Structure formats: C-alpha cells, structure tokens
Amino acid sequence: MRNYYKFTNLNLDEANIFDLQEAMEQGNLTSRDLVFYYLTRIAEYDQDGPNINAVMEINPDAIFLAEALDVERRSGGRRGLLHGVPILLKDNIGTHDKMHTSAGALALAQHISPEDAFVVRKLRQAGAIILGKTNMTEWANGISSSMWAGYSSRGGQVAHPYGEFFAGGSSTGSAAAAAMNFAAAAVGTETSASILSPAVQMSVVGIKPTVGLISRTGIIPFSYSQDTAGPLARTVSDAAILLGVLAGRDENDPATWRYEGSDGGQDYTGCLNVEGLRGARIGIYCDVPEHVLSSGEIDEFLFDQAVSDLTKAGAQVVKPIEIPSFHGPWKYNKINMEFKHGIQNFLHNLPAHMPIHSLSELIHWNQNHKEQALRYGQDILEYREGLTDLLNDRKYIQESVLDLHLAQREGIDHAIDRYQLDAIMFPAYIGADLSARAGYPSIAVPAGYMENGRPFGVTFAGKAFSEPALIAIAYSFEQHTKHRKQPVFD
C-alpha cells in the first residue's frame, strides 16, 4: 500500500503545504489524491504495522469533500493555502458531521456535536478537509492521576512513532499524526503543556498561542483561563499557515475580544524569514528542576548545541537569565474548579438521549462500566466532583489573580523587560506551565535526537500576541538546523 500513489517530482512524505498547493495549482495533484494518500498511510501505519493508534475516527465524507474542492479549484477558485488540504482534529473539538466528539471518553462515544466548533467553521471556510479525529489523553488528562499520556478508554493507547518513549501531553494523537504524516497538519488543544509536550516528544512543531488568539467555542473545556487550541505540524511554515486560519475574533468567546487581527484570520507567512534570528536577543533559561533532569527528557549536550546554533544564526544570546516566579509556589485550585464548572456545564447541555448529564453521573457511568472505562481509575474526577462553591471560592479568586501576576509581571514580562529580549528559550517544554498560567504563546521546535533515538526539542516563549516574532525565530532556527527526521520502521 505504501507506494499506491506516486507523484512526479513530489515526495508527499515530506511535502509541506506550500509544496502541496503548488502541485495542485499546476494540475499535478488533486485534493482527492491527497485524501487517498493520507488514508493509505493511516491504514498502513496507524491501524497496522507499528499501530500508532493516533487516529480515533475517519470522516466518511472526506473523499466527497475533496472532490468538491477540486471542482471549485478547476472553476478558478482557491480559498487560500488550506484549500483542499486534509487536517486532523483532536477529539475534544466539536464537528457537526458524521463524526463523534468524545474527549476520548467511552461515555461520550456516541456524542455528535450539535454544531461545528468556531475553529472548525474557519477551517471549512478556508477550504480545509476535516479528515478525522485524533486520539488523546481522556478528558485532556482530567480523569486519573495514574493514566498514561495518550490513553483513552474510547481510543486506547497512542504509540510513540520513534520508539518506547513517553508520548507527552494530552494532544498525543495530534502530535503523532503530524509526525507520521497522516495529514498535512493537525489541531491540538492545551491547558498546560498539552501541545508543547507531545510536540517536543515526537519531533514536530507545536504552537501554543496566546489565550484569546483562537476561539474555544465548541471545544470541550478544561480551564476557562488557560485553554486554547493550536497547530501541530512537521514544519514551522505548516504550523504558521494553520495558526493563521484558526485565529480570529469570536463574539461568543470574550477571550478573543482582545484580538486585533482580521476576522478572516491572520497571515503569518510573512514571518517565515530564514534570517529571523539575526539580531534577535534570546534569553536562555537553564534552571531546570532536578526531577525533570532525572526524567531523561532533557539532553544537556543537545540543549548546549541549540544555544550554539542560535549564535551561529546571528542571535544575541543572553545566558543565563532569571525568572523570579518560575518555581512558584503554584497551586491548582483554579484549574480544579474551572474543570468541574466547565465540564458540568458541558454535560448539562448534552442531548437527553446521552447517558450522562453531570460529573456525578459520569463517575457512576464509568463505575458501572469499569472494565472498559476505568483501566486507570478516576481519582481526579472523584476529587473534583466533591468541590463546592467553585467560581465563588476565595481560593479560586485569589489564585486567578495571583497566577497572572506571578506568571506575567514576575515571570515572562519580568525576564523579557529586564534583559530586553525578543524571546526566551527553554529546554524541552519546561516553560509550558509558566506560559500557560500567563496566557502567553510558546512554540516548540525539534532540536535533535538523543543517543537512544529519543527526540529532543526546545521551546521559544514570549509576551501576549508575540506569535509573529516567535514564528520568525522558530523558522530561522529550524532552517539553520534542519533537525527533524522521519520516523523509520522496518
């Protein structure tokens, strides 16, 4: 099956979105061809062979959608860079079609969203083909403290494309799908590290945008203050293209009301400058917690090499830098209470025929189906179900304010202003929680492979809505280093 589709002068295994559009404009490739190609790869690698298990469900209308978009292109219409390009979505992003939206939960296996999420509408308007849904850590890692990353009762365990390594974060299926080229790119979601962690682990690019750049309407919630969707792709250019389409103001999501770009999205392709690092001031954060060093996720040699690569590309490196609030003390009352409040609202609004409509009903349903639904238990759900007062709790209010103060003014803002930086570079994704609490953007980029083959990456972080600068820096780093390699199977 691997060579079922061959195209002259185009290696689809490594083609980026610019390449795909050029081939389709020249008549050497169609959207239908692309859908066939990606479906063939999914059949061969996701459900057979290495059995990556990244894709939860395929859109049965994908081929029809591709054919319609091919007709539109032949008639002289091209909506943009995603016209006719297949994209995969994390299973907590609502689609009003023949696919389900379950957040990986067996209790929601038959749930069909009553409408497209705002980001899905934007993707369809841009001409993207929603190819399917990706597996994820169930309830975005909100069910059990012992659940393995990338596992869901509905979808099973996502396998790491590069070996027997930690898969990282809850957007594991989207990251693995991007690494395996099961679609041109994928959309994940992040509350804290759920995009950045699997991106680093699986040698792909992940962008966790500013909270409010992308609407959360129609996405199963975790945290009101920190949730955001974001792209996962094999290249910075593909991630930037997808981010631009996803961005935009949504009247139903107040977080987006700060957004100053066009309602039609944002064009980040102008940021793709190979010399984006020349003259940029990059602060290097080196104070890695001991438990992270001992986990094997950080390779000090590769991180030092990444710092050297910045200098070679013309950046001004400031090393080391201090971030006063990096080690906290951080608390989790806010996250716990927002999770319960958001999930309660979501479940309450489910159709009458669904088996659950509250967190307590979800817990009871899981218990009644424990052989299938509770491989790792549900201690986090049970703890959160017992919380009261929620958004009126004194600790919640205090933490909501303190998180922003510490993460912004005593955290990222402090470092960038004190050292006059354009961005901060962290090893792996250790800055993810700080950026998440601040609501600030980060972008993860491949930075090599350890001796055992495990991928390593770095993360660039900045202030709110600094995506253009971060994309320019990440693209320049990527183009000067070209670290990413395809997963290889016997």
Image: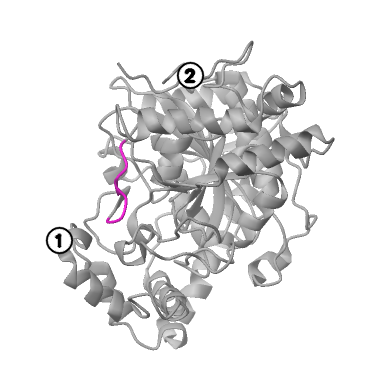
Label of residue 126 in the image: none
The answer to whether 342 is drawn above or below residue 308 in the figure is: below
Residue drawn where x is 36% and y is 80% of the image: 358
Residue drawn where x is 24% and y is 73% of the image: 365
The foreground one among 476 and 376 is: 376
In which quadrant is the N terminus drawn?
top left
Residue drawn where x is 54% and y is 59% of the image: 95
What secondary structure prevails in the magenta region? loop
Query: Could you say whether the residue bearing mark 1 is in a helix, strand or loop?
Result: helix
Q: Residues within 10 Å of mark 1 (few under 14, many from 20)?
A: few
Point out the stretch of residues depicted in magenta.
Answer: 153-159
Q: In this view, does 40 lie to the left or right of 441?
A: left
Q: In the rendering, at what x and y percent does residue 203 appear? A: 44, 31
The foreground one among 307 and 118 is: 118
Q: How far apart, in angstroms, are the residues tagged by discs 2 and 1?
A: 40 Å
Q: How crowded is mark 2: few (under 14 residues within 10 Å), some or many (20 or more)?
A: few
